[in-house]
Amino acid sequence: MAIIKSLSDQVYEYVFHRIKIGKIAVGDKIDEAELIKELGISRTPIREALIQMTSDNLLENVPRKGFFVKSVDEVAYVRFASVYREFKDVNTFMDELKKFLR
């Protein structure tokens, strides 16, 4: 059965991928207008994704300024924590962590 993701989930993955590959750098402001233009969608799912990313500690929401990418250490910690939660034993976790860090 195919899993259908919401637009905000797809935006989340898109922005996260761009951060991960370095297209959006640490400290950069997320340009909502550019995302609207690039993705051809309304502002609402973009805002929902950015708010969720803030909740997940990947971004910082500065009032009246916008959303900014947090430091590499903070992003790495969040990734580490998300990978850790998925595994019950330490050996499996360590194997997956090694793959993840490559």
Image (spheres, helix red, strand yellow):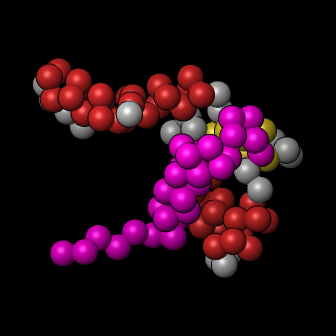
* Residue 68 among magenta residues: no
Q: Which residue is drawn at 54% across and 32% down?
A: 75
At a point 39% along the width and 31% down the height, the residue shown is: 101
Closer to us: 61 or 26: 26
Coordinates of residue 18 in the picture (x, y in percent): 59, 51
Residue nearest the observer in this picture, 35 or 56: 35
Q: Is residue 90 above or below residue 68?
A: above
Where, quadrant-wise, is the N terminus in this rendering?
bottom left
Asked if residue 28 is among those painted magenta in the image, a careful observer would answer yes
Residue furthest toward the front? 102
Residue 97 horizontal side relative to residue 32, left or right: left
Q: Residue 81, located in which quarter of the rendered image?
A: top left
Residue 88, given in percent of the width and then of the height, sits at: 15, 29
**Residue 39 to residue 71: above or below:** below
Q: Where is residue 6 shown, x and y percent of the image? A: 45, 69
Residue 52 seen in render: no
Which residue appears farthest toward the bottom when viewing the image? 40
Residue 93 higher or lower than 20, as above or below:
above
Tell me what residue is drawn at x 38 percent, y 33 percent.
102
Left or right of 60 in this view: 11: left
Residue sitting at 85 percent across and 44 percent down? 65
**Residue 98 at x, y percent in the picture:** 29, 28
The residue range painted magenta reads 1-29
Residue 36 visible in rendering: yes
